[in-house]
């Protein structure tokens, strides 16, 4: 197992370096944007005096490099700081929001991942026949439509016209019972599922079809095994590596890329929180959110790598 | 038959039969559904407010970055939430004028330069502390002192000194101002214990409700304040839910997730109104969408260029296409009929011939550069394109530069010579003119500088004779209309909507959205 431990250590170190670079990029990015937090807080109603007062109070009169290192120093001590705009503790606020985002991502993943893999297997089983074509057509169509449009369509027909589920997630409360919470996020979950389905389904299908060309599959066929058994027992395990990679990418998307869905369905997750603070140039919050998003991305990719190594005996037992 | 209908309407408004049932039975008696609904809502109004229940309101404009500090309130959500827990000294009355809130009564000195506000006797803050003149004076001082970052700093600038005299707050101005009570109704100037100097975000005030749950940018829950001095507030609980997305807000109303929403998009307001259980209400207000030019900068310092642009604006088309008819045409002054001393001028119409005449006379032949962005007002890029076309018909070339929403207010507005923008309007002429058209104003976004205008503005403040004052404002309006850099094609209506679960809507209250943001308190669960 030592190569895996070594690889893990390497990857984690690289991940930390990446996080550091990401934080510099985000900081530079928010500095380059026009306007600053004091102007955003006071908006159109800013007067020069009020602006100067607020800047001094928030410490914006210090040079950017000094502000960055103050922030970095705080992070190493586990302190994400307080939001410039509202004065709230960032860690507490993000904790709540991150919980909501993970809740949504978790249930979307629970539905989307097995469904995508099952549809992929089904498409291979009936390849080039109508079930395959139907699955491909539907999933490709749903990934091609912008997600906010799918959101509005579901909101109007399922939420308003049919009344099966609430059209917006405003009845979602972190302390409500599970059933209420699930009914509140039913439509966002449906949209997210439709958006990530195609990618995972197509990759499963392609990876398995690749393996299906191998000689041992022919042997299995000649042994008289059922087609679905061959795919599930013999072909799928050998195509796990690329599928896991795509699944992880999509899981990361479910956490970091759901801004649009959150805004459309008024769901209080990380995305909306980040967007609010970007538009106010609230740098500490943007930095903290950016770090968390980057960490999720890097972490999931790390898992993908480890899983594909474990799934491949040649990598597991190197000579 | 009429007796039977009245009996049914009574039962329906008392909740003994449902609205659907009532409309059905009324139809059996030969009444159309519309007439039946109308009859019922009249009956509900006539029965008067009912106490109790929960009212949920979905509003646009909230953000997780908002603060409970009233000094920092800058959009609809903090304004509405502030109304729940706090009160200013005075408030605008629905029919015009000002009424007392924390102040029981107020009076100005003969020259209107010193104002005395008598604090209402025996009222308490929601923490049990009784309200003193010192609390009120400190609250005003917090918004006017040097290191304040209050959004009300601009309007507090004319305040020289705030002192107390027993149970009275004395506001001394640096000159006469007959409109001071209107200024004191500003939504930032909520009275807080100790002026909110120690804890500005505590949300403790004298309002009809007490904030119980705050999730910034998401939702606020307020319960009735049992010790409130007045009779404002019908529902036991008011839930303010932030829904920034237009489609989601309308969908939430249609499915009954909320009872009231603001800012129905003009393009869909007609469709929304067609739903049987929803009423769309409009309020004509002082808000307007504008094209502003710096009159001290070439080519806009050339009066003929300005006149060419003004005659080249098709105002009716703007109201029809940009506001979908929910608004009224402007006349190149910021003053609408919603203002107290309004005088109507001859309407400036679209006239390509006159525009072409002035354009030739100006001797200028370069294209005019107009900057715009989607957030300068809803539909601004479309309005810019319409303007471009109506000018083209007069042979005037215009180029449009689309600017990003980000930084528009800091980089373009009040900085570049010609751009699109909006004004929310003010309760009085004096406030509107002093904010944006006085030559020394911070937000003089047209760089307007006519000595006669400034002179009239100052003398109108001290004028207590309404007739003379109306004349002065009319003269100022004419100066602005003919020499100003303001092209004001339209005044936008506020479009709000509510379901029939709630009742008590009053059209046009105080000329601002959501019955001047009192809708959740003044309406009731039907």
Image (cartoon, coloured by chain):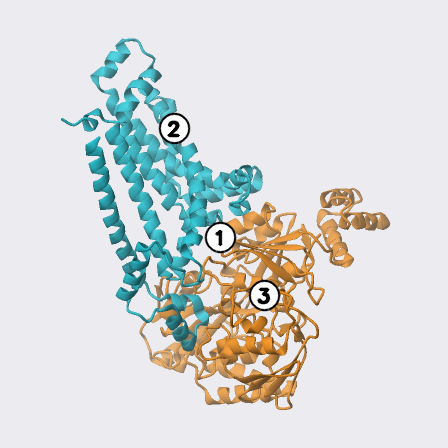
Chain colours: A cyan, B orange
Mark 1 to mark 2 CA distance (whole Å): 32 Å
B257 or B195, nearer to the observer: B195
A241 or B317, nearer to the observer: A241
Q: Residues within 10 Å of mark 3 (few under 14, many from 20)?
A: many
Q: Residues within 10 Å of mark 1 (few under 14, many from 20)?
A: some
Residue at the spot of label 2: A135
Confirm or deny contact between disc 3 and disc 2 (CB under 8 A).
Answer: no
**Residue B442 drawn at (x, y percent):** 43, 79
**Residue A301 drawn at (x, y percent):** 28, 39
**Residue A78 drawn at (x, y percent):** 34, 54
Mark 3 to mark 1 CA distance (whole Å): 30 Å
Q: Is residue A297 left or right of residue B88?
A: left
**Residue A260 drawn at (x, y percent):** 42, 48
Residue at the spot of label 1: B245
Residue B436 appears in the picture as rendered: yes
Looking at the rendered structure, the secondary structure element under dot 2 is: helix
Looking at the rendered structure, the secondary structure element under dot 3 is: loop
Q: Residues within 10 Å of mark 2 (few under 14, many from 20)?
A: some
| Rendering quarter of residue B520 | bottom right
Residue at the spot of label 3: B204
Farthest-out residue, left? A319
Q: Is residue B410 left or right of residue B482?
A: left
């Amino acid at each position: 197992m030592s190569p895996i431990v070594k690889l893990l250590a390497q990857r984690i170190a690289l991940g930390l370096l990446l996080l550091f670079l990401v934080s510099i990029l985000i900081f530079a990015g928010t500095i380059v944007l026009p306007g600053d937090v004091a102007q955003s807080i006071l908006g159109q109603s800013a007067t020069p005096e009020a602006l100067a007062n607020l800047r001094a109070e928030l410490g914006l009169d210090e040079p950017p490099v000094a502000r960055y290192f103050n922030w970095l120093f705080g992070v190493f001590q586990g302190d994400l700081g307080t939001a410039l705009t509202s004065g709230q503790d960032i860690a507490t606020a993000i904790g709540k929001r991150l919980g909501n985002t993970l809740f949504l991502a978790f249930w979307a993943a629970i539905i989307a991942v097995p469904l995508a893999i099952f549809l992929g297997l089904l498409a291979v089983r009936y390849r080039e026949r109508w079930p395959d074509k139907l699955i491909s057509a539907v999933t490709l169509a749903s990934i091609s439509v912008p997600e906010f449009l799918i959101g509005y369509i579901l909101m109007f027909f399922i939420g308003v016209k049919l009344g099966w589920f609430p059209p917006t997630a405003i009845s979602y409360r972190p302390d409500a019972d599970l059933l209420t919470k699930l009914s509140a996020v039913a439509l966002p979950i449906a949209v997210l599922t439709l958006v990530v389905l195609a990618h995972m389904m197509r990759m499963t299908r392609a990876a398995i079809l690749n393996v299906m060309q191998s000689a041992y599959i022919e042997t299995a066929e000649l042994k008289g095994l059922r087609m679905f058994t061959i795919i599930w027992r013999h072909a799928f395990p050998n195509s796990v590596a690329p599928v896991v990679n795509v699944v992880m990418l999509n899981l990361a998307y479910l956490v970091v890329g759901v801004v649009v869905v959150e805004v459309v369905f008024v769901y209080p997750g990380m995305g909306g929180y980040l967007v609010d603070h970007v538009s106010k140039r609230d740098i500490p919050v943007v930095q903290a959110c950016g770090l968390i998003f980057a960490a999720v991305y890097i972490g999931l990719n790390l898992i993908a790598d480890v899983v594909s190594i474990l799934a491949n005996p040649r990598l597991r037992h190197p000579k | 038959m009429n007796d039977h209908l009245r009996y049914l309407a009574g039962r329906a408004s008392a909740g003994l039969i449902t609205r659907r049932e009532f409309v059905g039975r009324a139809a059996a008696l030969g009444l159309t559904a519309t007439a039946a609904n109308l009859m019922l809502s009249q009956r509900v109004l006539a029965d008067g407010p009912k106490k109790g229940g929960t009212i949920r309101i979905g509003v646009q404009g909230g953000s997780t970055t908002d603060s409970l500090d009233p000094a920092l309130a800058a959009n609809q959500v903090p304004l509405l939430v502030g109304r729940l827990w706090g009160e200013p000294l005075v408030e605008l009355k629905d029919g015009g004028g000002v009424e007392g809130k924390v102040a029981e009564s107020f009076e100005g000195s003969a020259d209107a330069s010193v104002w005395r506000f008598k604090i209402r006797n025996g009222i308490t803050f929601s923490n049990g502390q009784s309200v003193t003149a010192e609390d009120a004076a400190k609250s005003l001082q917090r918004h006017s002192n040097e290191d304040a970052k209050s959004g009300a700093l601009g309007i507090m600038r004319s305040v020289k000194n705030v002192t107390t005299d027993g149970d009275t707050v004395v506001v001394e101005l640096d000159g006469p101002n007959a409109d001071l009570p209107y200024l004191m109704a500003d939504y930032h100037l909520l009275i807080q214990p100790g002026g909110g100097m120690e804890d500005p975000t505590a949300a403790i005030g004298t309002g009809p409700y007490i904030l119980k749950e705050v999730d910034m940018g998401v939702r606020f829950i307020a319960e009735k304040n049992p010790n409130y001095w007045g009779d404002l507030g019908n529902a036991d609980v008011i839930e303010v839910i932030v829904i920034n997305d237009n489609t989601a807000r309308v969908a939430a109303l249609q499915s009954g997730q909320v009872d009231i929403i603001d800012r129905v998009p003009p393009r869909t307001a007609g469709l929304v109104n067609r739903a049987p259980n929803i009423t769309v209400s409009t309020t004509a207000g002082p808000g307007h969408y504008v094209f502003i030019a710096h009159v001290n900068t070439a080519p806009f310092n050339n009066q003929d260029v300005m006149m060419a642009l003004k005659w080249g604006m098709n105002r009716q088309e703007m109201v029809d296409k940009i506001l979908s008819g929910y608004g009224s045409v402007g006349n190149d002054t910021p003053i609408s009929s919603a203002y107290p001393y309004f005088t109507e001028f001859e309407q400036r119409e679209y006239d390509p011939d006159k525009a072409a005449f002035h354009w030739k006379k100006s001797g200028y032949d370069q294209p005019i550069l107009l900057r715009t962005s989607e957030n300068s007002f809803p539909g601004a890029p479309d309005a810019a394109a319409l303007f471009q076309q109506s000018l083209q018909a007069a042979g005037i070339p215009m180029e449009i530069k689309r600017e990003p929403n980000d930084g528009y207010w800091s980089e373009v507005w009040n900085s570049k010579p010609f751009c699109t923008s909006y004004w929310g309007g003010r309760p009085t002429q004096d406030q509107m003119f002093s904010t944006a058209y006085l030559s020394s104003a911070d937000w003089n976004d047209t760089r307007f500088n006519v000595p006669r205008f400034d002179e009239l503005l100052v003398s109108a403040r001290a004028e207590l004779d309404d007739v003379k004052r109306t004349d002065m404002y009319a003269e100022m309006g004419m100066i602005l209309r003919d020499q100003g850099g303001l092209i004001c094609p339209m005044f936008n209506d506020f479009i709000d909507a509510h379901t029939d679960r709630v009742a008590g809507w009053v059209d046009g209250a105080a000329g601002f959205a959501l019955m001047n943001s009192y809708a959740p308190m003044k309406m009731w669960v039907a």
